Image (cartoon, grey):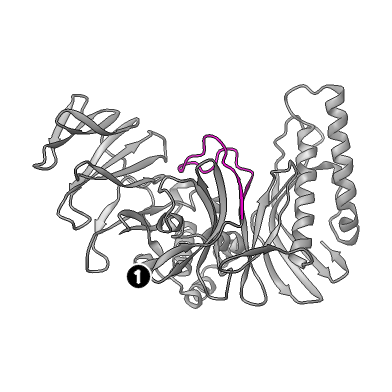
Amino acid sequence: MPGRSPAHPRPSRPPAQRAARTLYNFGRTVSRTPDSASLLLNGVTLARVSDTMVKLDFCRDVTGDGIPEAMLTGFSGGAHCCFTHHLYSLSNPPRRVLHVFSADTDTLTPQQLDGQGALELLGGDWRFAYAYGLPFADSPALWRIYSFIGGQYVDNSRAYPGVALREVGQPGPDTRPGQALYDYASLLVAGKTARAQTYLSQLPPRLRTWLTSYGPDLRQNLSDYGMSDWPTRAGADPDAPRTGIGGSFSAPGRAEYLAVVGQGKTAALRLYRPQSGGIVAGDALDTRPLPAGAIFETGFAGLNWWPAFTVRRATGRDDAVVYDASSGSVQYPVYRLGTASGTVLKDDALGAATRLIAQLEALARHVASGYASAPRSAAQQAEIQRRIDVAVSRVQPALALGNLKFDPRRLGNFTVSALEMPLDRADTARVVAPVTFGLVAAEQDSEYVTGERSTLTIDLTRGRAAGP
């Protein structure tokens, strides 16, 4: 389970011979082979799960309606991945009440957390697998908790801060990096901000420096914790692909989720928020065609538009920065959101900073594309050079104001992972972004350009950029 022992045991392999088990006196059975399991009624297959290995985790009534549920878990056979859980109510006909990709979580454990009604299902949240330079063996899993709401099991982890704190310890000289990350992140998701800062201050200097340096990334990474199923709770198809960020977008202190969610042949950007004990969806802020092949487990295949960063403003509200490469060039529009509408900020310091970041990303992409392994014709090489020239002309004015001393024509890797605004005034502002920064080498022979983690600071004065 999550916390101090992140590595989960693998399920034992089912026997090669066919096995059957009666699940309930309704006559439904699960038949299992090494790679599939089926729910049968009178010899008719009503549902089937296939994977490298499939096991029956449990058969019991977890929803509290007197009818048992069967948990079928598929395992892909990878070193650290992947498990997919399928929970069916054995009603007539059987109904799927949970389908979730669980990475390295090999089982979901039923527990009664609120003292009433359906049992909750507890598993792991693997957003920090390999994070911040950690090996998998020291990568922590946070708690992920599913509640039975509206006829479906949905991620409701935010409702149980006490569970998040179950295995949080005290920092000491022998604290592992992964344990420090688990403790600190768990305190944050439980709303214990002051305690989290105290914990951070008590860590050994090397760990404190490490976590502090990744602070913006970590906070961005946690912004949507427990929110991925808010669209489902607001009426979206449980299988609809979605990706989003969390923040206090319409007012300080509110928990809200800005997400792109697939619906039919389109994807819509909406703000999801709690209301009257449930979750409601705002009007569509934007819609785009839904890429073919988009599935829940892997997100949107080929999607070139999604909410990217949550940025706290001086007002205490958050603005949302959206990644948009639908036109062929990267843009980072900044959205100011209300509960029912949103506008793209035009004359704003954050928007000025994201335009520079988008220009640097575009420049890096064009430079790297000149080293593609596929042969380029003379015309293609000329077009790449033209694009580099245009991109350089756009970033040169800002580079001339700052202390970024490098040849822009060698910039082959520039990726931003978070954005923060430590200074946000009407006349002056500062935007800070952890970035991966890399220059093409003299012997460069591929589009892959190595980079190092750096911090980009952009100081702005109304009327001009003070320099990056």
Residue shown at 48%/52% (left/top)?
A: 127
User: Would residue 419 be found to the left or right of residue 78 on screen?
Assistant: right
The extreme left residue here reads 25
Whether residue 420 is visible, yes or no, is yes
Relative horizontal placement of residue 65, taking residue 449 as reference (left or right): left
Q: Mark 1 points at which residue?
A: 162
Among the 4 quarters of the image, the one containing residue 362: top right
**Could you tell me which residue is drawn at 89 percent across and 52 percent down?**
396
Compare residues 117 and 12 and report the one nearer the observer. Answer: 117
Q: How many marks?
A: 1
| Prevailing secondary structure of the magenta residues | loop
> In this orientation, which residue lies closer to the viewer: 406 or 364?
364
- Residue 367, placed above or below residue 417: above
Q: Name the image quarter holding residue 119.
A: bottom left
Q: Residue 204 versus residue 379: which sits nearer the camera?
A: 379
Q: In which quarter of the image is the C terminus?
A: bottom right
Q: Which region of the structure is painted magenta? A: 286-306
The amino acid sitting under disc 1 is Gly
Residue 230 on the magenta segment? no
Residue 439 pos. (x, y %): 78, 43
Residue at x-position 80% and y-position 44%: 363
Residue 42 spot, x, y in % from top left: 14, 31
